[in-house]
Image (spheres, grey):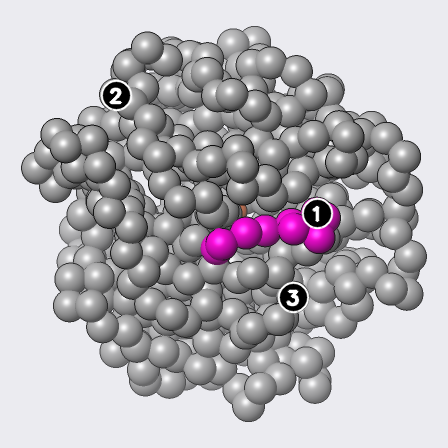
Amino acid sequence: MTVEQVPMTADRDTAWWMQGNYAPIEHELTVEDLPVRGRVPDELTGSYIRNGFNPPRTVPFHWFFGAGMVHGFDLRDGAVSYRNRYIRTPYLEHDLDLITAVGDLRLSPANTNIIRHAGRLLALEEAHVPWEIDAQLDTVGSVDFGGRLTTPMTAHPKLCRVTGELLFFGYQFLSEPYLTYHRLDAQGNLVQSEVIDIPRPVMMHDFTITEHFAIFYDLPIVFAYEHGGFRFDRSAGARVGVMPRNGTNADVTWYEVEPCTVFHTLNSYERGDEIVIQVCRARSLMDGGMDDLGDQATLWQWTIDRTAGTVTETQLDDRMGDFPRVDDRRVGLPARYGYVTGLLPGSHPILAPHVIRYDLDAGTQIVQAFGGGSTHVGEAVFAPAGPDAAEDEGWILVLSHEDTTETTTLNILDAQDFAAPPVATIDLPQRIPFGAHGNWMPTLA
Ligand SMILES: [Fe+2]
């Protein structure tokens, strides 16, 4: 994402994102009725789709810049089928690099997340507009909501289950506005866009909502031409901005916090006049440049007292982890259970041997470990047993990769019996590279 004097590609032999299970795969498959060990619960009907980086030809100079490929799992009547497809954008077709592609909002690698809103599947990456795909994972086209979206869209919008709105932001770093808030109504119409003033361009990967507020994280991964890209700058300070969901820039209240970085948020919610925010927080990031994903995050809670104007910062666990998720139905509301992919010190970002289930009310954790040290897992996604199921009544879906056999497995865990072996494991017909985010979707129709 640097601007000048940076090589467009990296060396295939030394780029860690081209080695092992970070490396891209070649084939687009469609496979029905995969062999299942154990039993896929009958109530588990729907699709799990995960996005990730899969550069087709040249070697991108950062792991995050490979073209997007989605992997979809359809679960129905105990049977599992799999298909994977590239998202066919100009970025893929013309083998673009991100330097060329920044500035034209359509030229997205579409590689970071895949969500469903207002009947559409949207593949997201934070420097561009979404790309729509269909239920067969074939690409439909770019989406700018009737020309109304004139900024990039984050890969981490938040769907409010109460109103059906999709709330999100877009940040950009080459020109103002550096931050814009957007609100889609339940029908997918872009009904509000508000420029939010921040003092300098920063990398802003995620945000959160509560019942009444949208919350922005102005943390100091600062864009600076003179340093050729983003870098952590403690002197820029760190602020959390709280804005009424239908408000404007003038309504934002900023709260200072200790300088830090947050790639991913777990959740936030209101508790009386307080706002509780749970995040995977690291002391710094990219100190040594954009490829330095070094100081890994642990789970923290920020409690904002809106009356006193104070923030209390509390570390909830000293285990490292990222890819935090709650039951999607609890986003913006109090959530008791959180799922975090555990990371190893000094490892590359996704070399994660276990998933941690947090009981945030009780302050306890359960760890589900995979394999004997050569197995690594991705993001853990909760799938409820039904629309009215209790918060933890359902299953966790998580991909694991076994290095020694170069095989990837879809694991289904009982969320209420989290330490138990998976209720079902499905070995996949090809390995799935470590990637980004996915979601459970009860229907794609
Ligand atoms: Fe992310």
* Residue in view at x 36 percent, y 78 percent: 367
User: Is residue 288 left or right of 363 when viewed as pictured?
Assistant: right
Give residue 130's quadrant in the image.
top right
Beta carbon of the mark 3 residue lies under 8 A of ligand 1: no
Give residue 244's mark: 2
* Earlier sequence position, callout 1 versus callout 3: 1
* Label 1 Cα crowd, 10 Å radius (few <14 / some 14-19 / many 20+): some
Q: Is residue 72 magenta?
A: no
Label 1, label 2: how far apart the Cα atoms are: 33 Å
Q: Quadrant of the N terminus?
A: top right
Magenta range = 282-290
The x and y percentages for residue 441 are: 40, 48
The x and y percentages for residue 253 are: 29, 23
* Label 2 Cα crowd, 10 Å radius (few <14 / some 14-19 / many 20+): some
User: Is residue 111 left or right of 358 when viewed as pictured?
Assistant: right
Nearer the observer: mark 1 or 3; the answer is: 1
* Residue in view at x 64 percent, y 24 percent: 173
* Residue in view at x 90 percent, y 34 percent: 5
Which residue is identified by label 3? Answer: 348
* Label 3 Cα crowd, 10 Å radius (few <14 / some 14-19 / many 20+): some
Q: Nearer the viewer, residue 323 or 51?
A: 323
The x and y percentages for residue 55 are: 79, 50
Which residue is identified by label 1? Answer: 290
Q: Amino acid at mark 2?
A: Pro
- Would you say the magenta stretch is mainly helix, strand or loop? loop
Q: Nearer the viewer, residue 28 or 359?
A: 359
User: Is residue 380 left or right of 57 when viewed as pictured?
Assistant: left
Please state the total of marks drawn on the protein image. Answer: 3
